[in-house]
Every structure is written in C-alpha cells, then in structure tokens.
Image (cartoon, helix red, strand yellow):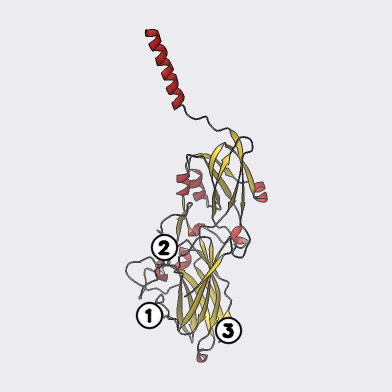
Amino acid sequence: MKTKFLISLLAACSLLSFCTREPEPGQASVLTVSWEDTATKGAATESEKQLHSLWFYVFDANGMLDTAHECTAADLSVRKATIPVKTGGKTVYAVANLPADRQNAANAAATLDELEAVTFHLTDNGESRFIMMAKGTANVVATSGADCPLKLERPLAKISLGTVRNSLPAPFGAITVKHAFLCNVVGNQNIACNAAAGTWYNQNGTDAANGGKTATIGQGGHGAQAAFTYRDVNASVNLGGSYDGGQVFYAMPNGITAEPGNPAYGTTFVPTCTVLMVVASIKGKDYYYPVPLKNTLVRNTDNVVNLTIIGLGNTLEDGPLNKIEKADLRASVTVSDWTTGSTYTETI
C-alpha cells in the first residue's frame, strides 16, 4: 500500500514539475534591420537626415532587452544591420543622434519601458544632428531569422518662414523684416514621444535672461534657451513686393490649441499654442505680427507660414502677442509630413 502511494506521489510531482517548468530559451538566430527616410515633397533636407550614430535595441515578448547594437560605418553605408538575437517575438527600436549623456541613459535601459522613458530636450539637437527614432516588431524564427524595416522620424516639428508680402497702404513704402522667432516653445520629450510638456522656452516671447516679462522680446535669452527659436532676417521689402523667407525653426510637439490672451503678459505663465512672431520695421518703428500655430504642432511635420502684411501690427507697449485683426494681417500655415509629403493648409 505504501509502495503504491509513493509511486502516485512521485507521478504527481513529476506532472507538477512538467506543468510549471520554464519555457525553453530561444534559439540563436538573426534579425536584419533596415531603415529609410523617404525623399518626398515633405521630406527632410540632407542636413536634417544626417546620421552620426544609430543604435538598435531589441526586446523580447516580455519587454526585456535581448540585445543592443551600435551601427558600424559599414551598416550606415548600406542602411542595414544584421543582429544576432534569439528566436521569438521582438520589439525593435532605432534611436539616432543622441548626445552622449542621453545615449548612456538609453544604453542603461534593461526594459522597453525604461528605454521609452529616456528624456531629451530641444537643445540636444544640432543644425545637422537631429534626434530620430523608429519602432517596429518582428517574429524571429530559427531557420530564416526575420526582417524589420523601419522609417526614421524626428520627434520635433519644423516651422518654416515662407513669404512675407508688403501690402500696406502706399504712403508706408518699403518695410524691413527684422527678425522672426518662436514663442511658447515646448522643449522636452522622451523616446516614446508621449512626454507631457514640462519645459517651455521663450515664454510669451520675453527675454527671461533679463529677469522678466518687460524686456524687449526676441532678444538675448532666446538664443541661450533654445538654438532653433530665433532668426535674424534684416530684409527690405518694397511696397507690393515680398520676401521669400528661408528661415527655419524647430520645436517639440505642442498639443495645446489655445492662443495667448489679451494681454499675453502676466505674473504667471500659462501654456498656449506655439506662436511664430515676425517683427517688421515700418517708418522707423517696430511692429509685431504673431501667427499662432493653433491646430496643434505635430512631430515630423514641416509647417510653412506665409504672411501678407496689410496694416500695422502690435507694438511692444500694447502687447506683441495680442491677436492681430485680419484687416492688418493675412497668414496661412501649410503643414506637410516630413516623410509622406501629405499636406493641409490653414488660413489664420
């Protein structure tokens, strides 16, 4: 009797062990990752597409790091990398052009969540060194591995000054477009591109470096706060003529659609939509023409702003960010995807 009981117990233990045994570890295989940045109507310029560093991070079905691969010069040349991995379902991240400290943070991530939470700022980008990311999935099998094509995208939006037309009444004559800059610029993001806005550059267009909201806007601290938010123009535009622009600005996405209030200045900054400010000198006095980017500022898009100046804009004393009447300014914003080239136009 005892013998039968012992046999039954052993059998039960064996069955329990079989049912709770950990799955077999994946077999060795390979994952081939390729990438592109399609050159279409809305595509980035060559400087915006430059790759100085590119890392691939491969995670298993449980979100744990399988391997990290730094692309070699040969990988970058052929736009493809073959990475040894284990079989199974994978999530693949490509991250390009991170500065050293942010790259170290990414390389310290052991899980998918940790990688996606790595943060960076607008100032971590450069004139020809734009952070880019891509995310994909693949199912790696033992016999043939897997392919994972990716499309690199920038986490920020581009704002381009298109044309500025002088349609003022004849007595005003020629004007000078002095400079243009962004106000209320989101400066922070993470690799997952889902970070809440927490850093704001050029709040209400004021020079924070000079201690408050009374300094001349568009000067000094703007350049120190964000590299891509201020551009000198200094272009003379004859009556009936136009300036063809060419200045570009960059900002992190901004989902807020509310425009600055009248007046925009206050003791406490209230986040609003990002605004492109154009400053024109007319008869020796500076006038401010704000163009609110109020349909949300979306990552990986180029927002081309065209202006027709019909009347006098705001003065510094009256509040540069106050809403401009259509009788004084006509503006349109054409938004195109950096990758697909799809567009839409909004008239302000």
Tell me how far mark 2 sits from mark 3, CA to CA.
35 Å
**Mark 1 neighbour density, 10 Å: few (under 14) some (14–19) many (20 or more):** few
Q: Position of residue 146 (x, y in %)?
A: 61, 42
Q: Which residue is mark 2?
A: 200
Q: Are marks 2 and 3 in contact (CB under 8 Å)?
A: no
Residue 47 visible in the current orientation: yes
Q: What is the three-letter code of the residue carrying label 2?
A: Trp
Q: Nearer the viewer, residue 202 or 333?
A: 333
Position above or below: 277 against 126:
below
Residue 206 visible in the current orientation: no
Query: Circle 3 — which element?
Result: loop
Q: Position of residue 97 (x, y in %)?
A: 56, 53
Tell me how far mark 1 sits from mark 2, CA to CA.
23 Å
Q: What is the three-letter code of the residue carrying label 1?
A: Asp
Q: Nearer the viewer, residue 248 or 297?
A: 297
Q: What is the three-letter code of the residue carrying label 3?
A: Gly
Q: Residue at x 52, y 52 (%)?
A: 99
- Camera-side mark, 2 or 3: 3
Q: Position of residue 176 (x, y in %)?
A: 53, 81
**Mark 2 neighbour density, 10 Å: few (under 14) some (14–19) many (20 or more):** some
Position above or below: 337 against 36:
below
Q: Are marks 1 and 2 in contact (CB under 8 Å)?
A: no
**Which residue reaches farthest left?**
267
Q: Quadrant of the N terminus?
A: top left
Q: Which residue is mark 1?
A: 318
First in sequence: mark 2 vs mark 3: 2
Q: Which residue is mark 3?
A: 241
Q: Residue at x 39, y 15 (%)?
A: 9
